[in-house]
Image (cartoon, rainbow, N blue to C red):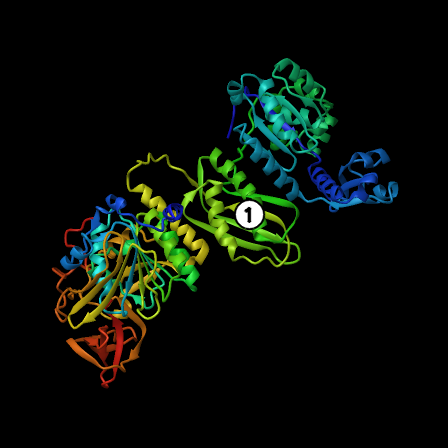
């Protein structure tokens, strides 16, 4: 989307994301292991093998004299016990998305600038928060929860904010003159302008931002590429950047690492309850409901167990979910201790504000759906079935069982009237030979059908009664064998 | 002595005639003799124990009552029936199939758990279970669940196994004598046991009169109406 050059932007620059994440993990690990605590943290670098460059480094490494952009050989000469990790862009992008997700709750327009930055459009939030200072305070609260190295700057142009932030500044103001002054001090090298074009500019004497501003843009038009020209005009505030705003994904995923291994499912439930509380809060804020959630239990010595928990009615309350999950967990066997739980909700249903009448039928509908969820959780999806009538003369083909709820179109289908009034309530799965003495009450009725689908039937049915008073539905085949097929209950 | 009686009352083990008001509303069964014997019909809710040989018309005896009682699309739960339920039969009896819940269960515990859940959920108007034997405590649980959920639970049992001292709302034994059913009220909450009397439970129609309900042939999917312009 394109914007005018008068709205205020903030750029968050997070250059050391992968290093920060690894440091946090390291601290978690050493917190469990007391011996490590005493040791000095080692010098750590993030290394890009293709570029052969050190991209990120911690303070220990800086003290030793390692610098950004060094090759691996020179870095390892300086320090012999260097901790080296390979640079992976996905880690940083994932972290940025998580951060954007958290920020989305307090600010609306976010753009992810891969691999190490976020744009926030502050202008339209100022009215909501009153002033830039208050807005910024709220943003900082969210950011400071993560222990990332973050630099930031505000400006009336996307690229200016980015350029100032890249100079490792902590600078949020809304005064145009101050921003302009700050911009003058910036180096041309940190802009997004092509490296080749910067060289060309330096040859014609453009060595700083100030020089860039002195000449009209048309003077550069033939010298640099179109891309660089675009950035230059953005820096000058003459055109606006094109950006795509971040849309948070419509799914929920949360991983919780347990403080100690849990081996009993009963002990797991309170922990799962905690996770569900988080889900409830997430759904509540978004006015959403969930129909199905995945629970993945990571076991210490065995593979993870994935449980898909379905509810017949969209719900969000953790107590309702826990109720269903407790039933499912009753017959869940853990092979070894569980160290982590992931709760994932793939699809979030929109809660429609239906005004439910206290006395209307809806209450039974809700009760029925809750009942279905409970039964399915305890007995299994396949054990709870609904019934449908299929128009067929063969008695064994009339009844169809299925697990999914029917849609409206099929419903009309089942409104068909049956052909016959007197059919037995119970049908035997397989007809059994008749071996008791019976007296025939009524019959015969011949059913000859099914020659078209390889299930041919020709039988003469009779209604019979035994001495004990059992009323049976018996039939005679063509070759004069008698069978019992059902009971009139 | 008085405290013992008090204790029993607290545990709901004694029924007193003072509670009669609760039982004023009955569900008519559709069979006159049976209604007379039961002070107007089945109770509004509770567990009903029916002892009979399977296949003597026990279901046809109770279905008219539960169909007439049906309000606001509540479910009928059939839990682990001994044989396949026939949809055609249920439809002929006036039950809408969308309201039928068919639950398969592997163990008696699961059957009883499901029955209790269905009964007390308030979503079911009738629950049917087939078991050889219920213990007192299990029957009590089911009875209370049915009262809570305003549901009629039916427990069909074979005559041989079940002792007749269960805490149920109503207990009947049924035996077929030729074309009549001989019904004996073993126990009921609002009256005395009643010795056997006869009720005629007929078939819906004489066998061999097909297409009774088929008034006009329904157009199939492959038939398109002449003026269909869509």
Is B219 placed above or below A197 here? below
For this orientation, the residue located farthest to the bottom is: A479
- Where is residue A42 drawn, in percent x and y? 82, 40
**Residue sitting at x 86%, y 36%:** A64
Where does label 1 land, which residue?
Answer: A269
Quarter-of-image position of residue B104 = bottom left
Question: Label 1 neighbourhood size at 10 Å, few (<14), some (14-19), many (20+)?
Answer: some
Residue B3 location in percent, x, y? 40, 45
Q: Secondary structure at mark 1?
A: helix
Whether residue B85 sits left or right of residue A107 in the image: it is left
For residue A460, side relative to residue A14 (left or right)? left
Q: Position of residue A361 (x, y in %)?
A: 29, 42
In percent of the image, x 82 and y 37: which residue is there? A61
Q: Nearer the viewer, residue A174 or A322?
A: A322
- Please give the count of numbered marks on the rendered protein: 1
- For the view shown, which residue lies furthest in the front direction? B1
Q: Is residue A233 visible?
A: no
Give how far across and how far down residue A169 sits, in percent: 70, 24
| In the image, residue A13 above or below residue A305 | above
Position of A80 with respect to A369 (left or right) is right
Question: Which chain is indicated by disc 1?
Answer: A
Residue A436 at least partly seen: yes
Q: Quadrant of the C terminus of chain A?
A: bottom left
Which one is in front, B175 or A204? B175
């Amino acid at each position: 989307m394109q914007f005018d050059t008068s709205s205020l932007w903030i750029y968050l620059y997070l250059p050391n994301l992968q290093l920060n994440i690894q440091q946090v993990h390291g601290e978690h690990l050493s917190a469990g292991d007391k011996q490590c605590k005493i040791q000095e943290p080692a010098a750590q670098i993030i290394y890009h093998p293709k570029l052969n460059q050190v991209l990120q480094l911690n303070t220990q490494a800086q003290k030793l004299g390692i610098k950004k952009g060094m090759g691996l050989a020179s870095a390892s000469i300086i320090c012999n016990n260097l901790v080296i990790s390979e640079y992976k862009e996905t880690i940083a992008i994932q972290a940025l998305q998580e951060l954007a997700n958290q920020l989305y709750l307090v600010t609306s327009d976010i753009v992810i600038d891969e691999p190490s930055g976020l744009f926030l459009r502050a202008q339209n939030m100022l009215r909501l928060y009153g002033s830039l200072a208050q807005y910024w305070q709220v943003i900082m609260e969210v950011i400071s929860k993560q222990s990332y190295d973050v630099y930031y700057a505000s400006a009336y142009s996307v690229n200016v904010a980015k350029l100032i932030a890249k100079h490792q500044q902590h600078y949020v103001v809304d005064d145009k003159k101050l921003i302009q002054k700050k911009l003058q001090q910036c180096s041309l090298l940190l802009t997004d302008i092509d490296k080749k074009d910067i060289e060309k500019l330096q040859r014609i004497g453009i060595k700083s931002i100030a020089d860039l501003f002195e000449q009209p843009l048309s003077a550069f038009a033939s010298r640099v590429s179109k891309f660089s020209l675009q950035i230059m005009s953005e820096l000058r505030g003459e055109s606006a950047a094109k950006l795509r705003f971040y849309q948070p994904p419509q799914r929920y995923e949360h991983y919780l690492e347990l403080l100690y291994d849990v081996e009993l499912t009963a002990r797991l439930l309170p922990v799962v309850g905690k996770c569900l509380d988080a889900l409830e809060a997430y759904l509540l804020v978004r006015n959403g409901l969930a129909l199905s959630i995945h629970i993945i239990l990571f076991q210490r010595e065995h593979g993870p167990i994935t449980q898909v928990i379905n509810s017949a009615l969209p719900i969000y309350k953790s107590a309702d979910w826990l109720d269903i999950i407790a039933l499912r967990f009753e017959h869940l066997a853990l092979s070894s201790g569980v160290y982590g739980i992931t709760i994932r909700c793939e699809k979030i249903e929109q809660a429609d504000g239906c005004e439910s009448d206290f006395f209307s039928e809806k209450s039974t509908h809700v009760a029925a759906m809750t009942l279905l969820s409970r039964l399915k959780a305890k007995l299994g999806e396949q054990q709870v079935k609904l019934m449908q009538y299929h128009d067929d003369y063969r008695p064994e083909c009339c009844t169809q069982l299925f697990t999914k709820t029917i849609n409206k179109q099929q419903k009309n289908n089942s409104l068909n009237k049956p052909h016959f009034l007197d059919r037995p309530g119970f049908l035997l799965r397989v007809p059994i030979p008749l071996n008791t003495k019976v007296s025939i009450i009524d019959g015969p009725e011949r059913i000859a059908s099914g020659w078209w689908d390889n299930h041919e039937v020709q039988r003469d049915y009779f209604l019979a009664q035994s001495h004990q008073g059992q009323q049976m539905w018996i039939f005679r085949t063509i070759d004069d064998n008698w069978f019992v097929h059902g009971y009139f209950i | 002595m008085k405290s013992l009686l008090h204790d029993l009352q607290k545990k709901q083990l004694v029924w007193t005639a003072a509670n009669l008001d609760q039982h004023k509303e009955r569900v008519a069964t559709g069979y006159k003799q049976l209604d007379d014997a039961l002070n107007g019909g089945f109770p509004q809710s509770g567990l009903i124990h029916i002892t009979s040989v399977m296949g003597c018309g026990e279901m046809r005896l109770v279905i008219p009552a539960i169909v007439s009682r049906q309000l606001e699309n509540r479910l009928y739960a059939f839990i682990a029936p001994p044989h396949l339920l026939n949809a055609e039969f249920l439809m002929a009896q006036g039950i809408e199939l969308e309201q039928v819940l068919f639950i398969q269960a592997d163990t008696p515990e699961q059957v009883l758990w499901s029955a209790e859940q269905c009964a007390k959920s308030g979503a079911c108007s009738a629950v049917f279970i087939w078991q050889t034997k219920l213990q007192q405590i299990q029957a009590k649980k089911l009875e209370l669940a049915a009262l809570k959920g305003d549901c009629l639970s039916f427990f069909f049992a074979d005559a041989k196994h079940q002792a007749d001292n269960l805490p149920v709302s109503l207990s009947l034994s049924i035996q077929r004598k030729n074309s009549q059913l001989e019904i004996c009220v073993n126990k009921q909450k609002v009256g005395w046991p009643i010795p056997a009397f006869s009720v005629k439970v007929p078939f819906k129609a004489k066998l061999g009169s097909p297409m009774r309900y088929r008034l006009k042939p329904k157009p199939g999917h492959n038939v398109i109406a002449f003026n269909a312009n869509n």
